[in-house]
Image: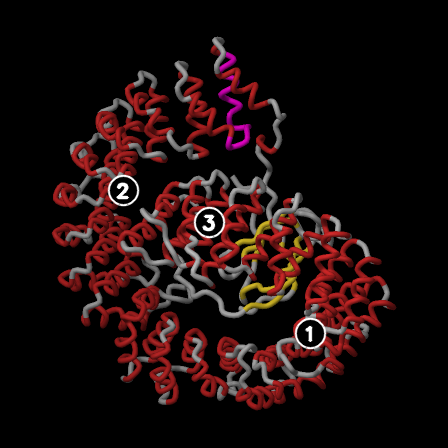
Amino acid sequence: MRVRLAVTLGFLLASTSASAFVWPNAAERVEKQLKASDVGARRKAAQRLGQLPESVARRLVLVALEDPDAEVRLAAAGVALELGVAGAGERVISWLSDPDRRVRLSAAELLIRAPEKRAVGALGRALSDPDGGVRAAAAEALGASQEAGATMPLLGHLDDTSPAVRRAVVSALARLGDARAVVPLIGKIQDSRPNVRRAVAVALGELGDRRASSALLLALRDPDEIVRVGALEALGRLADPQATLAVSALVEDDPRSPVRAAALDALARIATPEALDVVIAALASDDDGSGKGAARRALSGMGAKAVPRLEKCLAGQPAPAVADGCALALGDIGDRVAVTALVGALRRGVVRPRAALAALGSIGDPASLPTVLEHLEDPDPLVRVDAIDASAALLDPQKPDGRAVEPIARALDKARRHAGESVALIRLLGQTGSTRAAKVLAPLAEAADAERLRVAALEALGEIQGAKMDAVMLEALDADEPQVRLAAAVALRRTASGKSSRAILDRLEEAAEQDRGALALALSGAMAHDEIPADVERVQKLVLASRGGQRDALLEAFARAPGEKTFARLVRFAKEEAGVEDRAKLAEAVAGRKDARPLLASLAKDVDGAVRANAIWSLGVVGQGSDEALLVHALGDRDVAVAANAAAALGRVARRSKLHAEKALCPRLTDPRAAVRASALDGLALAKVRCAKAPERGLLEADRSELVRARAARLVARVPSGQPEKDHALLERCAAEDHSGVVAAACAREVEPLPKGSEPISVVVVPLGEADAVPRAPFALVLSDGSTRYGLTDRRGQVFEIAAPRGEVSLSVPAPLLR
């Protein structure tokens, strides 16, 4: 989806924790009290550990964990668990034999988060603890240890009297991946509790040993649905062809049944011709109310391996619902080799137009554009809408394609009575990027009967570089309707030539207060092509004479003007006349200049955190490998927004150069600040690299931050490692078990290609509870490539991004509010 130039979104300002402010001497007082002889004083100090800055709390927690008093240790353990304090696990091993049940449980829980090799023996003994909660936590900690020596103690407790403990033991054995557990687990497939039976089935699938197939086939008759689903998921992982017949029998269930969905997914994984025939046939009854039924999801999940079978489906004469399902699955997979088969099936009437058009749009091969354009004038309005959507997916204004202009213009002429369809077709003309389309759009932009059509025409003109329609857009700047003026300003920012600068400056010097914002927006586009010194001087004078938000808008225009003399003016202004807000805006706005690196390097050392954050982010746009040292240094900045932006910037620079970003980013996966950990994962994903020993897997399983776990899921899914099966199993377990719906969705989400192309955007930040944008408000802007920019809004309450990857943007929780 094309990003809008201005986006108004709210974000949740979570309540700050008590650590938002502490007196400077608070840490010293707490540290002193932790050493007091009075146990009451030590207990009060331990209760305050969570209120201290994280760096201090981590150090003092390790001290408090050694306290002889149980209450002090428990309070410290709670903070250690929340913060993920390194070294905490080693200090609590002896707690596993403590007489206080709370202490034993706390130790086991800490060892889950902070595994310790030396704890395996003590945890094995804890499996005999009289308390079931302690036994279950000990089992989970043994699984987290990843030590081979943990297997035998766990196997000795498969028959624990507590179902919760048995389930924990089974899950721990699955995590360890030890083949010695297969036969004992087979014997537990008929446990008395369904949750345990399901855990056994899942574990057998994760262990990947086909010796378990017969036991899993037996579990397909289980009276409990969750057990049958678990057994089917396991059989899919084992991909044993001998299971095809038994699994196929379950496809006859209700289309909405989870058992049917799991059976189809298992058959797609088994992927024998017989198995795939069953999945293809199931497309005929694939309506589960979701819009994408289980059979189609199963085929899509196969990826390129399913393409030959789906093409074979379209080569025959299947039932219409089956043919449509095959076409849509090919669209989901997105392999361009399928375009010929889709077009042929559409022309032969095998696939209905709506399914074929949706599939061709999803695949995105411009070669299919002529076929899609033929349906812009279809008698069926729903087909026409699908043809418009598919055409929009196939057209890229950065790659002009004049073939589409005449078919779209003819369809537009026939759609005059349908305003919504006309607007969509007008915007489609802009997406052609062809200057021929400008001739069709100009009359509409000048005097369309409806304001909505005129706005759409102006927006479309803004997509066409070299259209030479500045005069039309300049005239629209004088329109009575505010929306028309804004659309004209946005279009000029995108496509104005340098020749428009003078006319816009003339208007700006005489404009009423309410029009100056739109004019400044238009000026920034015109100045990007203006090397006329007189115009640059006029802009600089306007900057000096302006205040507040208007000054920020003019600075954006000033910063975009090309030429060495202009850059010298910018540097001089930054050093001699710019205040803090001016410097922050310049650090943001000069990201479009290749000559801006020296200025950005200087601003990256500014005393103000917002200036540094913008400068470091902008270096990610224009920086080179030689900027590595500066970006690496910024990773340790005390301002969390600066450090997080540095992580993402390193990933972006590494993507363009031979920079080995993992050397700097992997150590940051243990940074105490959630935003930095998350951005380090983003940077690794952008650079397409993973860390040695895959610590991102550990973050996905156990990090306390929902944001970090979701980012770890994306990295594991997007960037292959040397252990793809382990990654896949981890993502599946996360999708099924993570307590956060956001993280579970991230683990289940299909990998999408990185966006191509970029464009300037302005984002208006309206915090929740506010009526208007707020200046200098903290923000977190999530871009379509997965990176997140942190910082403070400008004096208008806006964020300017000169090279946002094309796609959707959103606002998230600002860095200072993340824990």
Q: Secondary structure at mark 2?
A: helix
The residue carrying mark 2 is 195
Residue occupying image coordinates x 56% and y 21%: 28
The residue carrying pointer 2 sits among few (fewer than 14), some (14 to 19) or many (20 or more) residues within 10 Å by Cα, namely some
What amino acid is labelled 3 in the image? Ala
> Residue 680 — which label?
3
372 magenta-colored:
no
> Viewer-proximal residue, 436 or 743?
436
The percent position of residue 632, horizontal first and vertical second, equals 50, 48
Horizontal side, residue 613 vs residue 209: left or right: right
Q: Secondary structure at mark 1?
A: loop
- By secondary structure, the bulk of the magenta-drawn segment is best described as helix
Give the mark toward the camera: 2 or 3.
3
Q: Amino acid at mark 2?
A: Asn
- Region in magenta: 40-55
The picture quadrant where one finds residue 444 is: bottom right
Q: Residue at x 43, y 21 (%)?
A: 63
Residue 306: image x %, image y %?
Answer: 28, 71
Q: Disc 2, disc 3: CB below 8 Å?
A: no
Distance, label 2 to label 3, CA atoms, is 37 Å
Q: Amino acid at mark 1?
A: His
The nearer-to-camera label among 1 and 3 is 1
Choose the circle earlier in sequence order: 1 or 2. 2
Residue 404 visible in the current orientation: yes
The quarter holding residue 520 reads: bottom right
Q: Position of residue 749 (x, y in %)?
A: 40, 58
**Residue under numbered circle 1:** 529
Q: Residue furthest top?
A: 37
Whether residue 382 is visible: no
